[in-house]
Image (cartoon, rainbow, N blue to C red):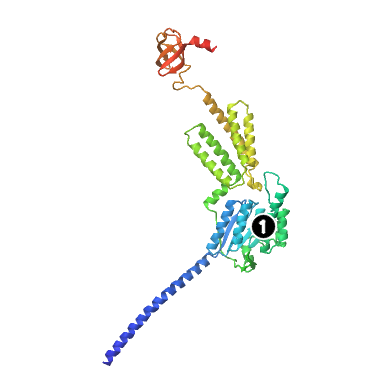
Amino acid sequence: MTTTLSFQRSARIGFSCRANGTARSRTLFPVLRVLIATLALIFAANCFADVLRVSVDDAIQPVTAEYIARALDTAQANHDQAVLIEINTPGGLVDSTREIIEKIVASQVPVIIYVTPSGSRAASAGFFILESADIAAMAPGTNTGAAHPVILGGKMDDIMKEKMENDAAALMRSVVAKRGRNVELAESAVRESKSFTDQEALDKKLIEYIAPTEKDLLRQVSGKSFKRFNGENVTLSLADQPVRDYRMTLKQRILTYIMDPNIAFILLAIGALALYAEFNHPGAVIPGTVGVVFILLAAFALNLLPVRFAALVLIFGSFALFALEAKFASHGVLTIGGIALLVIGGLLLVDGPIPEMRVRLVTALAVSIPLGIITAFLMSIAVRARRNKIVTGKQGLVGEIGIAETPLAPSGKVFVHGEIWDAVSTANIAAGERVVVSQVDGLILRVDPVTAARTVLA
């Protein structure tokens, strides 16, 4: 009896142990899942805690602003330690510069601006971007500054000029003061267009570091505290940290290429020529397709650039002169005038603040002279073709010489163009005499004697 009770008690104890084990397992699994998820996040953060590198080697324009903005968003999403923007620019558009500064200031990931390689520059808009960075650095042999705002296309009045200078200077002061750099000297780059070498910029507290290489820069930055725009003190550990490139998308690379004012002008000129060829040869299809594609690409690029619409009027006016050259015998005067208008229109097309954002004289001449000659030549051929006598169909019979097969008194048969036609003559004509066709009336020809026709013509 005792044994039986003991066995039953043991069975109950065993069952209780199994039940407690199951309950603990059920409690433990959620904890393990949370722990695994946390470790995965930490592992992912460590995997992506890199330095994201962005390369800007062009004028500052809308595509540049989009490229940098997406890079900063990517760095934040991947929890990168820092974004390294390697810059070499002659300057660019004010609106695009402001967009970039806004993104850098608002970035949750520290931004390092590095002017590199040696011999490069961060001029004009590049100086604003350099000073907006959490950490500003330059390679030996680089320069920065010359940030005076410029507007082309006419002389500004004193009040407007003063407004622009004050606005740009205020932007510079607001950025530089928060970064703890030399406000007065930075403002002088705006008002007096001062420029600085790498050593001058370091000595006068416009930048924090001079580094010959990217690796050396990250080593110098590592372990040193700096103040962010929001006042927070941050220390980065970047020595020997992996650097990951952030490249432009295919769309951005294409836009960057066609937004070169020289490329946009070439696309516009070739597109106009191709459309003209299509209008003069309807149904050719290929010229029309090429023309539409090139014109749309040029329009898209020019929409993002500061364009003078008066220059577009000059360009289209040049094609009008080419057309007039084909109609009137001006001995090349109208063609030369058209080429001159096309060159001037090309040079004035993009109102860029820096030479790199304008159409070069070499490009304008290289496009305008051949295009003007080709267009005038094609138009002259088209006009001559329209003036030539029609040699097919009913109109092709008018003026043709034939032989009277039967007497025409006044109707009969004539042989013209290898065919025998019913004909009506204005005078009696004997068989075998020559006649000239004066009119085609359905299937009946109206003819005149050849001698009479000559007398009339005389």
Provide the secondary structure element on which disc 1 rests. helix
Q: Which residue is mark 1?
A: 171
Q: Is residue 380 above or below residue 165?
A: above
In the displayed structure image, the side of residue 221 where residue 188 appears, left or right: right
In the rendered image, residue 165, in percent from the top left (x then y), is placed at 70, 53
- Residue sitting at x 69%, y 44%: 154
The number of callouts visible is: 1
**Which of these two is toward me, 336 or 229?**
229
- Residue sitting at x 57%, y 40%: 268
Look at the image and tell me whether residue 367 can be seen. Answer: no
**What's under tag 1, amino acid-wise?**
Leu
**Which picture quadrant has residue 376?**
top right
In the displayed structure image, the side of residue 239 where residue 31 appears, left or right: left
Q: Is residue 7 above or below residue 191?
A: below
**Which of these two is toward me, 350 or 209?**
350
**Which picture quadrant has residue 334?**
top right
Quadrant, the C terminus: top right
In the displayed structure image, the side of residue 354 where residue 435 appears, left or right: left
- Circle 1: is it few (<14), some (14-19), or many (20+) Cα within 10 Å? some
- Residue sitting at x 51%, y 42%: 293
